[in-house]
Image (cartoon, rainbow, N blue to C red):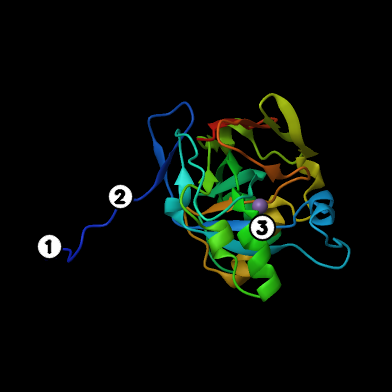
């Protein structure tokens, strides 16, 4: 018989995403993010996509924000939106071949990689990690997850973000430098991927600041929408 061990402290509940049109939830293990995965965004950030490959960073699972307004965070005057296709994994492993990587995918969601751009920029200048710019409270708003057995594996389709009804970001999933299968394969060389992992796959060009009172609407063709109020 397993001995019940009393926890020395009680922790917040684990974060889950709703599964669209289902009573099930998707429990979240880790959040990985891809940086500079669309050439036009790399260029707008001052980088040459022909010379620098995309790369990875992480957010914390409890940075997810589901079905709530986004509260403008402290210590920044330049919080920016990055609309991204989010991949949720149902299986994982190490050294996964790109040809088999889509078998690991449970489904897809619409996410925002909210960024304290001023803090990120200062950390870049100092050669320091990005966490204070990227992995803060509520920095990962995300829609429900749409299972791949319903939406397939979108390889192309519009990805866009409107702010107060005006188009701000616009691109196409086909513009991703690393495709979803390649991201999973590459990531699995560095980390042990697990069921419940989410991957934010990078943002198209047009990133920009948000202000309190803004209404954001993210849309990914073939996947879904994410609407978010900034307060
Ligand atoms: Mn991003």
Q: Is residue 74 left or right of residue 46?
A: left
Residue bearing mark 3:
34
Tell me what residue is drawn at x 70 percent, y 38 percent: 154
Q: Does the residue at mark 2 contact the one at mark 1 (Cβ under 8 Å)?
A: no
Secondary structure type for disc 1: loop
- Distance of mark 3 from mark 2, alpha carbons? 26 Å
Q: Nearer the viewer, residue 51 or 99?
A: 51
- Distance of mark 1 from mark 3, alpha carbons? 40 Å
Secondary structure type for disc 2: loop
Q: Nearer the viewer, residue 198 or 103?
A: 198
Q: Nearer the viewer, residue 30 or 136?
A: 136
Residue 114 position within the rendered picture, expressed as x and y whole percent measured from the top left: 59, 48
The answer to whether residue 195 is above or below residue 51 is: above
Residue bearing mark 2:
13
Residue 144 position within the rendered picture, expressed as x and y whole percent measured from the top left: 50, 35
Q: How many residues crowd mark 3 within 10 Å: few (<14), some (14–19), many (20+)?
A: many
Residue bearing mark 1:
4
Which is more foreground, mark 2 or mark 1?
A: 2
- Distance of mark 2 from mark 1, alpha carbons? 19 Å
């Amino acid at each position: 018989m397993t001995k019940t061990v009393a926890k020395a402290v009680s922790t917040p509940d684990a974060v889950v995403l709703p599964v669209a049109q289902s009573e099930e939830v998707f429990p979240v293990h880790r959040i990985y993010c891809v940086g500079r995965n669309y050439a036009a965004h790399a260029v707008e950030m001052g980088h040459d996509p022909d010379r620098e490959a995309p790369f990875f960073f992480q957010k914390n699972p409890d940075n997810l924000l589901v079905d709530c307004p986004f509260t403008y965070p402290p210590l920044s005057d330049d919080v920016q939106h990055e609309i991204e296709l989010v991949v949720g994994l149902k299986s994982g492993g190490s050294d996964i071949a790109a040809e088999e990587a889509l078998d690991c995918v449970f489904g897809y969601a619409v996410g925002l990689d909210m960024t304290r751009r001023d803090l990120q920029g200062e950390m870049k200048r100092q050669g320091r990690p990005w966490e204070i710019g990227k992995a803060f409270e509520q920095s990962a708003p995300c829609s429900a997850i749409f299972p791949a057995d319903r939406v397939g594996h979108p390889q192309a389709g519009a990805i866009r973000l409107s702010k107060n009804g005006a188009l701000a970001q616009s691109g196409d999933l086909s513009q991703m430098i690393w495709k979803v299968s390649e991201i999973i394969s590459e990531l699995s060389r560095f980390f042990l991927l697990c069921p419940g992992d989410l991957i934010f796959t990078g943002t198209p060009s047009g990133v920009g600041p948000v202000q309190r009172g803004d209404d954001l609407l993210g849309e990914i063709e073939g996947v879904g929408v994410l609407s978010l109020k900034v307060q």
